[in-house]
Image (cartoon, rainbow, N blue to C red):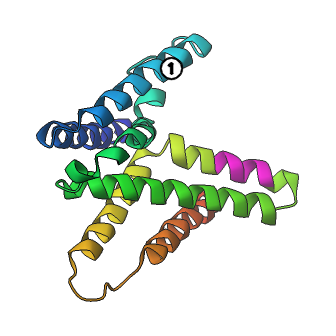
């Protein structure tokens, strides 16, 4: 049942992305994301045959990564990107979330000196990124909502981008704590 929910979340995430790219004619981002998915899935299927094919969970759950990497090619078309609030929030929300993951990784590497604790923490961070698409995409949608609400306020926004980054970091550290307590 959990795998079915994960597939559904990834399918909705990808479907809305493809629909928005077609609607606002941002084909570069879409094509680069699809090419990255196919190339990286083919490479991973050579390394892990039968486990990491094109439509296997390992490659499908990484769809946010392919979309994030493909977004580098959408930055030069900011005029068209500003027409779609969803794609703009997806772009900045994805980079904020990934930045928070890097900060969390640096914190773990700097603060944890015991190797016995370090390895499970690194595995948990990797698991959150790769094997928990419901958490990763769900938290990305929350971040996108916060960024969208921030952009629609005409007066001084309630929160800054820094606050959203701290929220991302907080939810990832909370995931680490819950994982070590056996709640996940």
Q: Residue at x 47, y 46 (%)?
A: 132
Q: Does 54 sit left or right of 153 as displayed?
A: right
Image location of residue 151, percent across then percent down: 26, 72
Query: Which of the two residues, 82 or 9, is positioned nearer the viewer here?
Result: 82
Quarter of the image for residue 138 reads bottom left
Structural crowding at the residue carrying mark 1, measured as other residues with C-alpha within 10 Å and reported as few (<14), some (14–19) or many (≥20): many
Q: Does 75 sit left or right of 170 as displayed?
A: left
Let me know if residue 123 is in the magenta part.
yes
**Can residue 37 be spotted in the picture?**
yes
Q: Residue at x 22, y 36 (%)?
A: 18
Image location of residue 181, percent across then percent down: 63, 63
Image location of residue 115, percent across then percent down: 86, 52
Q: Does 87 sit left or right of 163 as displayed?
A: left
Q: Residue at x 50, y 20 (%)?
A: 52
Q: Residue at x 42, y 42 (%)?
A: 72
> Which residue is denoted by mark 1 in the rendering?
52
User: Above or below — where is 18 with respect to 117?
Assistant: above
Q: Does 85 sit left or right of 173 as displayed?
A: left
Query: Which of the two residues, 82 or 148, is positioned nearer the viewer here?
Result: 82
Quarter of the image for residue 62 reads top left
Query: Which of the two residues, 154 or 103, is positioned nearer the viewer here?
Result: 154
Boundaries of the magenta span: 118-124
């Amino acid at each position: 049942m959990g795998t079915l929910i994960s597939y559904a979340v990834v399918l909705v995430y990808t479907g809305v992305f493809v629909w928005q790219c077609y609607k606002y004619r941002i084909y570069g981002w879409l094509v680069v994301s699809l090419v990255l998915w196919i190339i990286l899935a083919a490479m991973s299927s050579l390394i892990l045959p039968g486990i990491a094919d094109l439509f296997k969970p390992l490659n499908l759950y990484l769809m946010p990564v392919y979309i994030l990497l493909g977004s580098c090619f959408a930055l030069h078309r900011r005029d068209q990107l500003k027409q779609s609030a969803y794609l703009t929030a997806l772009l900045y929300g994805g980079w904020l979330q990934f930045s928070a993951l890097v900060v969390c990784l640096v914190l773990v590497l700097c603060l944890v000196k015991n190797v016995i604790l370090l390895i499970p923490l690194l595995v948990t961070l990797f698991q959150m990124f790769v094997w928990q698409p419901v958490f990763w995409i769900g938290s990305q949608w929350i971040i996108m909502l916060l960024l969208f609400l921030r952009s629609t306020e005409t007066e001084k926004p309630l929160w800054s981008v820094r606050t959203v980054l701290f929220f991302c970091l907080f939810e990832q550290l909370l995931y680490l704590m819950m994982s070590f307590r056996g709640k996940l």
